[in-house]
Amino acid sequence: MAYRKLGVDNKHRRSMLATLTKQVVNNESITTTETRAKEVRKTVDKLITYGKKGDLTSRRKALAFLHNDVETVNKVFNDLAKRYANRNGGYTQILKLDERRGDNALMVILRLVEEAKKEEKKEEKPAKKETKKEVKEEKKEEKKPAKKTTKKADK
């Protein structure tokens, strides 16, 4: 299977994923178990990709998945799509916490990646090394004696 069953039937699983996805989009961070976070990450990435496409079909698919939550879809299409316009995937980040008391399930924080406000300037690469030919030519020029020019002094 290409997905985790999460210990519930299909309808419950789809509803849970939609709800967790809404929470991640609206709050930009949630605390949940590791397996749920890994599944929700997939849906959040798909949703933001729909937002970046921006066409009517993508908006309808997003609305269908999020149970017609217009506010969340508007946030994805208007805010998050612009924020991640230059990023190709990897919109979420998982930070591990301690195990949950009771069932010892690993808890994590799933949050949207903060995009850098300032675009970093790319460092210029150092100039290419001079070729042997160029080095030899420079040495020849240095070795050539300068022509002596004598000016006759006016008397």
Image (cartoon, rainbow, N blue to C red):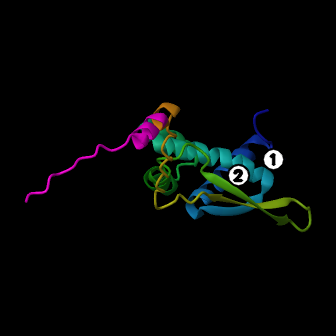
Name the disc covering residue 104, or none: none
Horizontally, residue 75 falls left or right of residue 104, namely left
Q: Is residue 27 above or below residue 67?
A: below
Where does the image place residue 109, in percent across and percent down from the top left?
Answer: 72, 62
Say which amino acid is labelled 1. Leu
Q: Earlier in the sequence, mark 2 or mark 1?
A: 1
Question: Label 2 sits on what residue type?
Answer: Met
Seen from the viewer's position, the closer of residues 106 and 88 is 88
Q: Is residue 114 magenta?
A: no
Q: Residue 46 lies in what quarter of the image?
A: top right
Image coords of residue 27 (percent x, y): 59, 64
Separation of marks 2 and 1 at Cα, in angstroms: 10 Å
Camera-nearest residue between 105 and 86:
86
Marker disc for residue 6:
1
Q: Say what secondary structure mark 1 lies in.
A: loop
Range shown magenta: 136-155
Q: In the figure, is residue 99 to the left or right of 84?
A: right
Question: Badge 2 is on which residue?
Answer: 16
Q: Please state the horizontal and vertical placement of residue 154, each as a whole percent of the image.
A: 9, 57
Q: Please report the residue visible at 51 percent of the width from the left and 34 percent of the height from the top.
A: 131
Taking the magenta stretch, the answer to whether it contains residue 138 is yes
